[in-house]
Image (cartoon, grey):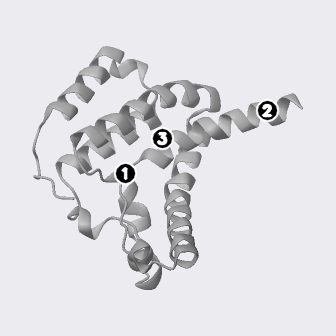
Amino acid sequence: MQRRQGRVSAGLLLLLYQISQVGLQNIPCVTLGVLALNILLFLNPVRPLSEVCISVNEGFYRKNWQRLLLSPVHHADDWHLYYNMMSMLWKGIMLEKKLKSIWFAYIIAVFSVLSGVVYMVLEFMLVKILDDPSYEMNCAVGFSGKAHSPIYMCKISIYIGTT
């Protein structure tokens, strides 16, 4: 999980191009803020990936809880950033307009922490079920859980509203 700091590459250039094609004026404020934060931290990471990724060992045993906040906004490489942010861009445009900015920001904030907790619980279960302690060391970064969770929540709320 090594990345050169400040490096502009194909995935990042394509992401910036896609954002320009949509137009900054067409991207709601929370979605734009999330995109900007992730791009900024990709170009200027707070710490190396090995120090921000979430794992059972780091998050649970060492109680390094700040990783729950740092891991979602760091990405392994430019294509990881590109795919997560493109997903966030399209879902954010649709959902932020539907849910309104404050509710959408709340969902993103909650799922940013919750997805890391769920990740650690699943990894901990793998350790116990498979009797393989190597799963405690698996480390994850990225925005995937946050980019996909609002769409599922929206679908659930639509389903609940129609029953």
Specify the farthest residue to the bottom: 61
Which structural element holds mark 2? Answer: helix
Q: Which residue is mark 3?
A: 147
Residue 37: x %, y % from top left: 32, 45
Residue drawn at the location 49% of the way across and 46% of the way down: 146
Residue type highlighted by circle 2: Tyr
Residue drawn at the location 13% of the way across and 36% of the way down: 9
Is 158 or 130 nearer to us in this picture? 130
Specify the farthest residue to the front: 130
Which structural element holds mark 1? Answer: loop
Tell me how far mark 2 sits from mark 3, CA to CA. 20 Å
Residue drawn at the location 85% of the way across and 28% of the way down: 162
- The quadrant in which the C terminus is found is top right
Mark 2 near mark 3, Cβ–Cβ under 8 Å? no
Above or below: residue 10 compared with residue 76: above
Specify the farthest residue to the right: 163
Tell me how far mark 3 sits from mark 1, CA to CA. 10 Å
Q: Which residue is mark 1?
A: 142
Q: Mark 2 or mark 1: which comes first in sequence? A: 1
Q: Which residue is mark 2?
A: 159
Specify the farthest residue to the top: 21
The answer to whether 92 appears left or right of 22 in the picture is right
Tell me if residue 49 can be seen. Answer: yes
Which structural element holds mark 3? Answer: helix
Q: Quadrant of residue 139?
A: bottom left
Tell me if residue 64 can be seen. Answer: no
Is 139 or 103 nearer to us in this picture? 139
